[in-house]
Image: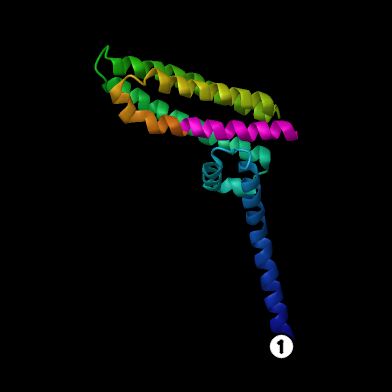
Amino acid sequence: MASSLCTVFILSLGLSLLFTPALAGIALIRDTCKYTTVHRNLCFQVLLSKRESQRADAPGLAKIALKIAHDNASKLSAELVELHDKAEDMSDLQQCLEECLRQYEDAMEQLDDASVAVDTRKYREAAQWVSVAQGDVRLCQVGCRTVPEYKNMLTKQNGNVGRLCSITASILRSLAVKH
């Protein structure tokens, strides 16, 4: 009887030690995302979707959010190139896509600059870079608003990149206050 109680205790202890880091990681993700008041649920879903988030500290979560924003901007930029190449020469759509490509190139450079700032613990500066990148994403959206074909093609993806930048900037601003 005593040996079975000991086995149950050891098994319970082992399981609790196994799940404690994951639960702590989820709690940190939830705590970090509370600073993203507008997109709190999206923040939680996006960070939780990355396995490395569950073991990351707060600056690590900021880096992960930054990488997700950059990856999405890069993916959309590649899509813009493809659409540009298919668009009719000198059409409004082609001109809109050219402008968006320039905006996204700038945005990705700014997200890279933000990553360097995070690496050196300059969170306020990193948040500023991300906010500038978010502005470039907005400029693409606004600049192509009058092109009907664009609205159907990229409005949703452009909005997603903007929301990811917003989440990342909020996380970085919270880190700037704490550190």
Q: In this view, does 17 lie to the left or right of 48?
A: right
Q: In which quarter of the image is residue 116?
A: top right
Pinpoint residue 58: horizontal percent, then vertical percent: 67, 41
At a point 67% along the width and 37% down the height, the residue shown is 59
Q: Look at the image and say whether residue 173 sits in the magenta stretch.
A: yes
Q: Mark 1 points at which residue?
A: 1
At a point 42% along the width and 29% down the height, the residue shown is 158
Res. 66 visible in picture: no
At a point 37% along the width and 16% down the height, the residue shown is 98
Magenta highlight: main SS: helix
Pinpoint residue 106: horizontal percent, then vertical percent: 50, 19
Amino acid type indicated by mark 1: Met
Q: Is residue 140 left or right of residue 69?
A: left
The secondary structure type at the circle numbered 1 is: loop
Q: Look at the image and say whether residue 171 sits in the magenta stretch.
A: yes
Q: On screen, 165 above or below 142?
A: below
At a point 28% along the width and 25% down the height, the residue shown is 149
Res. 53 visible in picture: yes
For the record, the magenta segment spans: 161-179
Pinpoint residue 14: horizontal percent, then vertical percent: 68, 67
Front residue (pair 85, 27): 27
Q: In which quarter of the image is the C terminus?
A: top right
Q: On screen, 78 above or below 8?
A: above
- Count of numbered badges drawn on the protein: 1
Q: Quadrant of residue 160?
A: top left
Q: Is residue 172 left or right of residue 137?
A: right
